[in-house]
Image (cartoon, rainbow, N blue to C red):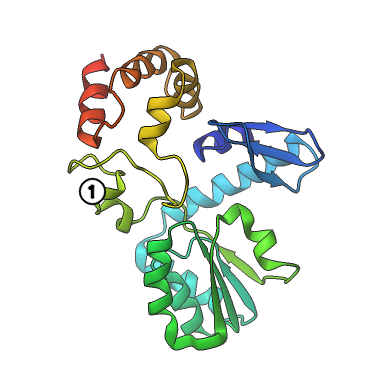
């Protein structure tokens, strides 16, 4: 359902309060995104279409993905790269001939790489430190001919132990897509009540019994656990 997908994107609940459907943070209940949809049924329909498109995209070999990006670029106009990352797709779109690119990413370090990579395109692109949920505000009334979003964690985040996304090498339990965000994963573990941690885990599709067990283990980790300590604790608690 729409709610389940938003949970996987770390958006906790759907609510129709105050007009449009809103996605709320599992941490503090703050509204993180609003959907321009009238009902939950509309959201479910859009989510189903998005899931089908995502599954189809996953089956496309990498060279064919490059062709699809080039095809999107050949139509000119304004195109959005909603997850610009290191700038690879944005570079391909600009090289293919789009008139203008608007790029967004939550990761300032990735944006710095993308800015340098795309510098040769001059005034044909603009990059924003923003979530893709903020796209409407970034566009500010401009119409885009197409939007590309390559969702997921990037190699820049996985390959750096200090980012805390990988369990292969020890590092701080950070896991922030946006390092300017106030809360990292360690703070969430340390300061969230056990029942709230359990709710977060359930929202991420962890079965109820395991979610309860894992939440209890997380609260026993202390104030500054490493990724290796987290992995070891979860492994020990898994039947």
Whether residue 225 appears in this view of the structure is yes
The quadrant of the picture occupied by the N terminus is top right
What is the x, y in percent for residue 151?
A: 47, 53
Looking at the image, which residue is at 71% across and 46% down? 35
- 147 or 10: which is nearer to us? 10
Give the percent coordinates (x, y) of residue 178: 45, 52
Looking at the image, residue 118 sits to the left or right of residue 226; the answer is: right
Seen at 31% across and 28% down, the residue is: 223
Percent coordinates x, y for residue 171 in the rendering: 22, 42
Q: Residues within 10 Å of mark 1 (few under 14, many from 20)?
A: some
Q: Looking at the rendering, which quadrant does residue 64 occupy?
A: bottom left
Residue at point 34%, 42% (across, down):
174
Q: Quadrant of the C terminus?
A: top left
Q: How many marks?
A: 1
Q: Nearer the viewer, residue 11 or 220?
A: 220
Q: Nearer the viewer, residue 77 or 170?
A: 170
Give the SS element for disc 1: helix
Q: Can see residue 1?
A: no
Q: Position of residue 63 (x, y in %)?
A: 36, 69
In the figure, 169 relative to 138: above or below?
above
- Relative to 218, is 207 on the left or the right? right
For label 1, the residue is: 161
Is 151 left, or right, of 157 in this rendering? right
Tell me if residue 14 comes above or below residue 88 in the rendering.
Answer: above
User: At 29% from the left edge and 17% from the top edge, which residue is drawn?
Assistant: 220
Above or below residue 78? Residue 187 is above
């Amino acid at each position: 359902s729409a709610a389940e997908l938003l949970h996987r994107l770390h958006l906790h609940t759907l609510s129709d309060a105050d007009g449009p459907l809103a996605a709320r943070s599992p941490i503090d209940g703050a509204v993180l995104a609003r959907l321009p949809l009238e009902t939950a049924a509309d959201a479910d329909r859009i989510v189903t279409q998005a899931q089908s498109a995502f599954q189809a995209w996953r089956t496309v070999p990498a060279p064919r993905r490059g062709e699809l990006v080039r095809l999107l670029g050949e139509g000119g106009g304004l195109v959005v790269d909603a997850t610009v990352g290191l700038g690879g797709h944005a570079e391909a779109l600009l090289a293919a001939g789009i008139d203008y690119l608007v790029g967004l990413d939550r990761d300032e370090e990735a944006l710095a790489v993308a800015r340098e990579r795309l510098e040769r395109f001059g005034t044909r692109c603009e990059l924003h430190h923003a979530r893709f949920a903020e796209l409407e505000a970034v566009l500010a009334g401009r119409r885009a001919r197409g939007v590309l979003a390559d969702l997921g964690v990037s190699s820049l985040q996985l390959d750096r132990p200090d980012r805390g996304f990988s369990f292969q090498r020890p590092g701080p339990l950070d896991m922030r897509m946006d390092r300017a965000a106030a809360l990292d994963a360690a703070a969430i573990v340390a300061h969230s009540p056990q029942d709230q941690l359990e709710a977060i885990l359930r929202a991420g599709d962890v079965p109820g019994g395991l979610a309860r067990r894992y939440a209890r283990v997380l609260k026993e980790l202390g104030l500054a656990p490493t990724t290796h300590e987290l992995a070891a604790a979860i492994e020990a608690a898994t039947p």
